[in-house]
Amino acid sequence: MADAQGESFFERALANLAGAWRDIAAGAARTVGLNGAASLPHRPEAWRALMAECLAARGGEVSARLRAAELGQAYLELEGDEKRDFLEVLAHDFATDQEQVIERITAYVEATDAAARMAAEDDLRRALVPPRVKLLTQFNALPEGVKFLADLRADLLRIEGEDPYLRGLERDLRDLLESWFDVGFLDLRRITWDSAASLLEKLIAYEAVHEIQSWQDLRNRLDSDRRLYALFHPRMPEEPLAFVEVALVKGMADSIQALLDESAPAVAAEAVDTAIFYSISNTQKGLQGISFGDYLIKRVVQQLSHDLPRLKSFATLSPVPGLRRWLDRAGASTIAALLSEEEQGGVRALGGSDQLPEALLAILTRPDWWQDPVTATALKAPLLRLCTFYFLERRPAGDPIDPVARFHLRNGARLERINWLGDTSANGLRQSAGLMVNYRYIVDDIEENHEAYMQRGTIAMGPEVRTLAKSVRRIAA
Amino acid sequence: MADAQGESFFERALANLAGAWRDIAAGAARTVGLNGAASLPHRPEAWRALMAECLAARGGEVSARLRAAELGQAYLELEGDEKRDFLEVLAHDFATDQEQVIERITAYVEATDAAARMAAEDDLRRALVPPRVKLLTQFNALPEGVKFLADLRADLLRIEGEDPYLRGLERDLRDLLESWFDVGFLDLRRITWDSAASLLEKLIAYEAVHEIQSWQDLRNRLDSDRRLYALFHPRMPEEPLAFVEVALVKGMADSIQALLDESAPAVAAEAVDTAIFYSISNTQKGLQGISFGDYLIKRVVQQLSHDLPRLKSFATLSPVPGLRRWLDRAGASTIAALLSEEEQGGVRALGGSDQLPEALLAILTRPDWWQDPVTATALKAPLLRLCTFYFLERRPAGDPIDPVARFHLRNGARLERINWLGDTSANGLRQSAGLMVNYRYIVDDIEENHEAYMQRGTIAMGPEVRTLAKSVRRIAA
Amino acid sequence: MADAQGESFFERALANLAGAWRDIAAGAARTVGLNGAASLPHRPEAWRALMAECLAARGGEVSARLRAAELGQAYLELEGDEKRDFLEVLAHDFATDQEQVIERITAYVEATDAAARMAAEDDLRRALVPPRVKLLTQFNALPEGVKFLADLRADLLRIEGEDPYLRGLERDLRDLLESWFDVGFLDLRRITWDSAASLLEKLIAYEAVHEIQSWQDLRNRLDSDRRLYALFHPRMPEEPLAFVEVALVKGMADSIQALLDESAPAVAAEAVDTAIFYSISNTQKGLQGISFGDYLIKRVVQQLSHDLPRLKSFATLSPVPGLRRWLDRAGASTIAALLSEEEQGGVRALGGSDQLPEALLAILTRPDWWQDPVTATALKAPLLRLCTFYFLERRPAGDPIDPVARFHLRNGARLERINWLGDTSANGLRQSAGLMVNYRYIVDDIEENHEAYMQRGTIAMGPEVRTLAKSVRRIAA
Amino acid sequence: MADAQGESFFERALANLAGAWRDIAAGAARTVGLNGAASLPHRPEAWRALMAECLAARGGEVSARLRAAELGQAYLELEGDEKRDFLEVLAHDFATDQEQVIERITAYVEATDAAARMAAEDDLRRALVPPRVKLLTQFNALPEGVKFLADLRADLLRIEGEDPYLRGLERDLRDLLESWFDVGFLDLRRITWDSAASLLEKLIAYEAVHEIQSWQDLRNRLDSDRRLYALFHPRMPEEPLAFVEVALVKGMADSIQALLDESAPAVAAEAVDTAIFYSISNTQKGLQGISFGDYLIKRVVQQLSHDLPRLKSFATLSPVPGLRRWLDRAGASTIAALLSEEEQGGVRALGGSDQLPEALLAILTRPDWWQDPVTATALKAPLLRLCTFYFLERRPAGDPIDPVARFHLRNGARLERINWLGDTSANGLRQSAGLMVNYRYIVDDIEENHEAYMQRGTIAMGPEVRTLAKSVRRIAA
């Protein structure tokens, strides 16, 4: 079994397990193969054979894992369609054995007492776990194995299309990752300016809500009146799974530009009474559908409550990402109903059109409409009312149109306030017509809000929004 | 929802999550209840209701987990039969829904194309996962949740008997733990005299093979010519899952008493050429059947090879725990066949009986027979031959009688040597008739040995044992 | 310059600096020499030459330090008188240059203006620093160099006798260590049962006040109602310099046996109101005269105040180590004055002597006198009074006789209470006639107490002791 | 002693010691005073009184240190001339007591035997240590006390001028810092992209040799083929004292622009044979004159030799910072002697002047002269010869003119090579006429080179430079 250099596959593999592979998976030495990983023929038959060996645990379970790692390494070196070919072999050739399933279904149906039924049930359950699941588990032998699997799922989500086998494989992987990324395993860590530059660099790359412009911008977000918390898996200690950025302020923040202003002085610790969650990002495409946001927010609320007892309220400063698109499609009658005669006249005049929707959209299309005091004044009340109406609208399933609203309301937050010109960035104007909202988490109300929302679709509101909603409902009625 | 003290369940719960519960589960403050955990009525109806709430995720998933933690805490306070009552509620009332299973079986059987079948298969698989599994997962919210679950399984193994529901629950738990304790998640750590006393204390308690007599004895086992490695789960950083004790020696060690002699000087680093694994212990009853030993040995071989390149061989010094029992039952003809006339005469004379088995057992029953040179000389060759024969005997399933042999041979080791008077402790004489054996792990041969053993039952042997085995086979033939 | 093996002295030295020497100094490999350290002739001429090379910084300062380390290593291998020889070379041959001193004195005396005088003063100061001081500093290149120097001073203190050169060297070393062990550099660390066994083992060895009997005893002293803090130097992270043992109790503790009782349950955290410092130990002989105790106590008071706000008072439970010796010498008239007629009669009867001192000492010599209720009752009031009188007695310098009293009173504590039968161990009876006292640190009073004690010799007292003192003074007057 | 808030100075002080002051000194909360530190009158009398209290250790040594910390805090709040006032009080009013010095001089001179002389010597030495030194030591109670003292010295160096008292104070401080910053106490740490951003930010600020342009530039200097090591004091763990940047390359690097090119690929680990030290920076002005560079280089050579055994040579890539200034002043005859007729003609033509020095300098003043092939070719040989001659020139003290040369030659390096157009940055052209040199550290030769240089001024040279030097000497002779 020893090769020319007098080392066995196993020996090198053992040596590599903690060493080279770690580098390899880290991308540091992609060209160094294991047992000629580079030379593992990029052909389905070769993969299939190696997969079968892994599943048969040839040479023992430890050896099988080393082979699985080799296979995983080979996968990392594939490109484009080759990846699809590899995944198809895995998905098709190692799916459940239907004959066996049918056999066990028969046994289950025929079981006569509890003990026999339980045993048959267990047998059937195991028959329904495709062999490929074992192989997915074996990939955990790779250094950064969980990261490998998460990335594998990201590949699948991109590739799978309607292929039922690939989708089945993707579902298997999702189930495995959901179990392994159970929130009970995650660490909450505060990130500061004393954190590793290599980690901070990832935050810059991952932040999706309000892009981090520079190291200086990031530093500002880690200032004494800021907090940044991230969730980590113990086997991916250098990869944040999700992170939230918090500003400690006095009163409820109403403008993201004000929050991110690098030249603004830090708020004095003794003045702070509110924590504003102004950005929440998930980072791993391969963990799509496995939600960390709700848990992250509540853990951070708990942590901040403990560390800073003077904090009186916890709220987000969030975009209304579907507003503008909804406005684009809103009917003339809806808009007319929500605007007074005078307001309608104003919009028509400013928008240069007799048609109300066209006039409104014409204004909103101008990049600097909000900087003109007359226009801004004319639009403020109408847009706040339209936005309120938008929040009250439902999808066919009965839940709100706005995805951010769905997330926070489901978590038990209440819609606290709508902020006029809360985000005047190009993106804020394009998506949210410049509006931002605060969702407020009142710890005592979270359960009740959640239940009311889940069972009756009730949207919890703060006083300001409630007043707006009443007037909108009256008008719309 | 706020109680008399003006704090909601949730608020306290959040506060407790990282705080009090951690203590509670650690047993430090068993009497501090959560939401009156102490006052949670110890009645099946109360448990059932709370379990149902957890599964319904009332108040949101984070709240559900807090409730599950409360439930887990209540369980920790139960005693004796109450635990059984609790587990029965969980096992019976939250088992799979048979009607749903039958429904989905029907759908599966009727599926006509691959996509439909895949979807039906997935539905069926999910229907076969009993709701109680979700609750088990939610217990992970407990501080030291994985330890809680492992201990829960230890309780189940003790209690379950033949109850099919309890056994089903125990199997569910086993599957969950097997996934969560995948070796890919485990850390190998070297334990030294610089490790925490609280950890070392656990080793003293857990060591099962060669009891640690005192702190001084432990210190000796952590000396410069010793190594002790343990596997840890990242969520149980203070609980070794399995550990192995290694002596670095010159030549293959043949006596456990010599190894454990506190007064013996440490072997000089430059003389060392062999690593002897003289004790391997699993520590968690609740992880029974989830094997770490094979992985632990091979990881330590790898680690030692890397750290100490001068090491030339890796072997165990192991007991032969079934030998004496086997001797007790060995027939007169077997014994007679393996002893020369002269040897038979010697045994009869020393044992004071004409019957060969009785004479032999009479000698072995004397506590100090091995200290008498004449007796020892008379028994040496016969016992070595009998022991070799014992290793060659098979259970009906075709594998060796000796459980330690089964473990190491399956791992790919070879039976290297049988050591006369290798363990003269009371236990060593009682179980192994004073013999010990070396199983040797030759990295290059592990895969081949494993395959030969798994497929053909072949036992790999070192030259000495092979010679013995040949003579024994010739005699026995 | 390269030797037979092709490595230069320097190369090996560099390699050794962080490697072998560390081991060497740790005693792990005493036989491995540096540049044949083992073969450095154990002769004064060889040492002298190497010392001169170090001081001349031959080969540059880094090389000089490597040579100094070699020299230090050679010293570690010396035994008995050889050490004295070595130290004498260092002390005599590298003392100050008198001629140079006289020259600079002349320059100093003749300096006419401030600038010239300052320069001359600086020159003179430098001339007064003996060359050996530079060499002492160079020894800091040794791994654990500061530990080496502390141990060197311990050797000197043992050896020096009246030799003025050796005493000078010892003074130089003391000055250097005093600067390097400035309390501003020290770390206060809490030691727990989770600390390294190798560290805990040292506490067992170093504890001088109330010997630690076993690992179980130590564990009891690290229980939830105990604290143990130690001071460390950053370059001796494994060597505690001084440590204090604290019991968290309800009310002022009055018995050391009760405190150290392993079977006593831990005091509930919510009942605790007092921290009792029941043992303070200095560990390094070579740091004799460099005091850490005052600083240690006050840092721990601060730390505990912060961690446990419910603590209301901080006090010691201390021996009265000079009491018994003082009683042995106390005159009959002193004793008679402090005892009533009735008490005198009782003592005479129990002691079986007409002579009061003899009768009293006869009783105290019986090992179990305190277990006899009659005797104990008869002695209680007399001994408390005698002890109070003892505290009021002064040495010629005006300070108390009792060394422990001097330490705590100087620190600003007050003499709070005298505890009858506070220490009934053999040692407690032999030194302190079974009494113990509490010195209490009231943060607000510390400065005032210190000043009153330093300037006027005033002893601050708690109410009980003040009452005792008044009656004693009245009697004695 | 308690103030209005019911807290004593001491209590607050204790509380502050580890808390607020740490922040204060960190500049985080400059406005929070201690005992009204802000209100400590900024008047010499107030400082003098508090200094006297510190020295008298009123209230005990721990209290004195707290007062010293308060004083230090007050100092931190002073501005401009106030600092000078403060330092003058400290320098003048707490200088040595001349009368006492004279007294002890007398005692010393009159001492008749060794013991008396030793004692008198010790007394005199102590009398020569000004009281202010004790106060400097007490400042070590400040959080980051050593940083405070280093910064204090930086202030003094800026302020002192010719004032003999201030210079005396600065010398005292230097002696103290030299003892406390002994290299034996320093930690060598490798800095990587995984280091804290707050630390990396300091490197960007401190790098003085080749300015770090951006985070991207820094990242490039921490790439896989780079190393950056820094020295730290255990009490200033976030402040590098000195750091060195190293490039791992194949062959001796000859151009700093090539080394710092962010777009250049990393050198493959297996090709590397040379470590190039291309930047060494000292960071603390207050530690001026306390040299870390020699030690840093040799420790890094040792570390790299250990980590990367394939490294064959260690060299710097250094500027020739005095070359251009020397050329400006070089006489016509010197230049003429070193250039051939033809070369002289070329320079005259290109420089547009008949005068050789003027012509040469005219060329070198053009910012892009080196980009013109004709000019570059014409100047290469002449400049290399002139540079060699420059290295051979001596200052009156006998050592080389070039400061970088003095540093490395004294350390035992040899002048290996002169690199044409090694630094074509504006700064490199202005100072070094675009040349750079390699100083090579050959471990075996360091001691000999150092001794030859120190005793005879011999400059060790590599073969190329030796050849150049020979030709230059021949010409110049």
Image: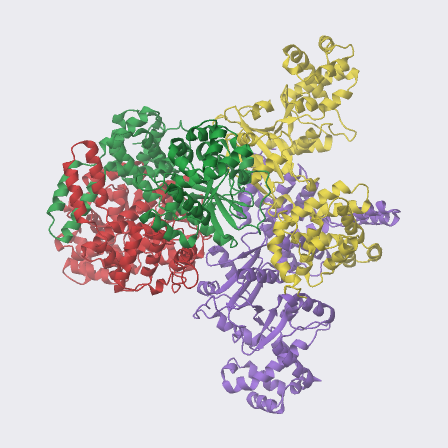
Chain colours: A purple, B yellow, C green, D red
- Left or right of A25? Residue A124 is right
- Left or right of C410? Residue B281 is right
Instruction: Mark yes or no: residue B362 visible.
Output: yes
- Between C94 and B455, which is closer to the camera in this rendering? C94
- Between B36 and D258, which is closer to the camera in this rendering? B36
- Residue B390 picture location, percent across and down: 72, 22
Please identify the quarter of the rendering in which residue B183 is found. Answer: top right
- Left or right of A96? Residue B200 is left
- Between C443 and D80, which is closer to the camera in this rendering? C443
Q: Is residue B464 above or below residue D83?
A: above
Q: Residue at x 50, y 53 (%)?
A: C312
Q: Residue at x 20, y 51 (%)?
A: D386
Please identify the quarter of the rendering in which residue A304 is found. Answer: bottom right
Name the quadrant of the C terminus of chain B: top right
Instruction: Mark yes or no: residue D243 visible.
Output: no
Q: Residue furthest front?
A: C341
Name the quadrant of the N terminus of chain B: bottom right
Q: Is residue B226 above or below residue A290?
A: above
- Residue B203 picture location, percent across and down: 60, 36
- Between D178 and C231, which is closer to the camera in this rendering? C231
- Residue D304 picture location, percent across and down: 40, 42
- Residue C209 picture location, percent across and down: 45, 36
